[in-house]
Image (tube, coloured by chain):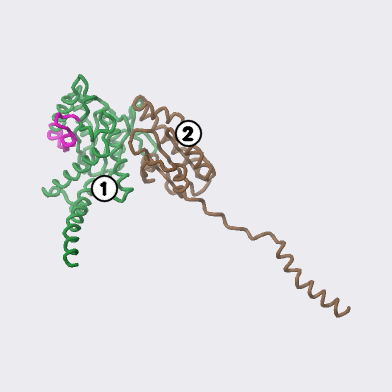
Amino acid sequence: MTRLRKSGLVLLLAIIPLLLGACAAPAAQPDSPARPLQETVGEALAGYTGLVPVELTDLVGLTGLDETMIGDWVYLVSADGLSAEEVIALRCTEENHVPAVKERLEIYLEQRLRETRNYLPDAYACLQQAAVQTEGRLVLLVTGSRAEAWAETILAGE
Amino acid sequence: MALLLLLACLFACPAAAQATDEAVYDSFFDQQVFVGDSITRHLKIYLKEQAAKGISVPEPVFLTAQSYMLYTASRRNLLERHTNILWRGREVPLREAVAEIKPGRVFILLGVNDYAGEDIPKHIGYCERIVDLLATPDTRLYFFSLTPVTRRFSGSGDRRTQWDEYNLALEEMCRRKGAFYIDIATPLKDGEGYLKEEYCSDGLYHLSPAGLRVWLDTLRDYARQQYEQGLWSPEKEALQ
């Protein structure tokens, strides 16, 4: 083999690993962390100020929700205490927790309906339109006159 | 410069002392139970709102439901066609939730959904049943007076007077049964005995933030009196 051929072969052998490396599949990227619910909900509310934050422990006391199933949460109730506006957004730690958490929020919604029937007709009418929704690990209950728009934005952000 | 520092201390020290006192009096209510309807539910929301602003406020456990009635609270068993307390995912009679929480103090404001002033003996009877159901050597009961109502809600039947008479009967019942009565009505009234307009949020009987602030001040005043009379202190309570 001529010296030139040998050199070419050595060069080829040297660059082959480089070529293979360039063609290899990109290294798997870690999952991007989910956007904090506080941000998503804040965006959905678009400056609406009539809601007050409440601790998750309150919801636990009412519904028997298992706190260990919840990784991130937002719980907002109407500041005037009488209208139906509420946002409860719960991101579960695992997707298999979603049915159990959904059930708890449905219990909460049923109680709100019982409380307002024959007492606060406007709130009752709003609550009748509400339903607990899920998207991935998110369980969402939004009630009130702006519920549809708020829920759409929050779910889209998930 | 020294004068400025002195002036700053003169203003800051009383404010700091007041904040400390309030925290002490607030602890009288921390983790105790407040039972009520939409009026008390609104107190809960008001306190959460203050806490969210970083303002120190009492932190009781609330057992409330909009449209909750004195009658329902007085029942031993669940009333299926009534609004009940939701606790840990179940509708429960009040006594069951209180028995599980085991508070040292239970504060109750109920009666407006019953129109309690329209039949005083009947509704005082319900209060007596509540005492019998909930009071133990370790759990004391405190009944709030019914809060005043507006002229509009008072109407031709003069609920203002009925409410006042009911409150007198409630106070007497508390003395007789070993419970405690807390008058939150008087500081909320105008010169004619109606709910002051600025303290009302709906033109009827629900309280505005200003009215809820009066309620909070009345609570703190009550706790202060207990403290100054040597009937309670956080230190004594911690030892129990």
Query: Looking at the rendering, which quadrant does residue B131 occupy?
Result: top left
> Looking at the picture, how far across and down is residue A32, in whole percent?
55, 54
Badges 2 and 1: C-beta atoms under 8 Å apart?
Answer: no
Label 2 lies in what chain?
A
Residue B175 in magenta? yes
Q: Colour of chain B?
A: green
Q: Position of residue A92 (x, y in %)?
A: 48, 47
* Chain corresponding to brown in the figure: A
Q: Residue at x 17, y 51 (%)?
A: B233
Measure the alpha-carbon separation of dots 2 and 1: 34 Å
Image-based side of A14 in relation to B88, left or right:
right
Would you say residue A25 is visible in this rendering?
yes
Mark number displayed over residue A10: none
Q: Is residue B154 above or below residue B63?
A: above
Which mark is on residue B57?
Answer: 1
Residue A103 horizontal side relative to residue B204, left or right? right
**Chain letter for mark 1:** B
Q: Which residues are magenta?
A: B172-194
The quadrant where residue B152 appears: top left
Outermost residue, bottom side: A3
Which label sits on residue A131? 2
Question: What amino acid type is highlighted by mark number 2?
Answer: Ala
Residue projecting furthest to the left:
B229
Q: Secondary structure at mark 2?
A: loop
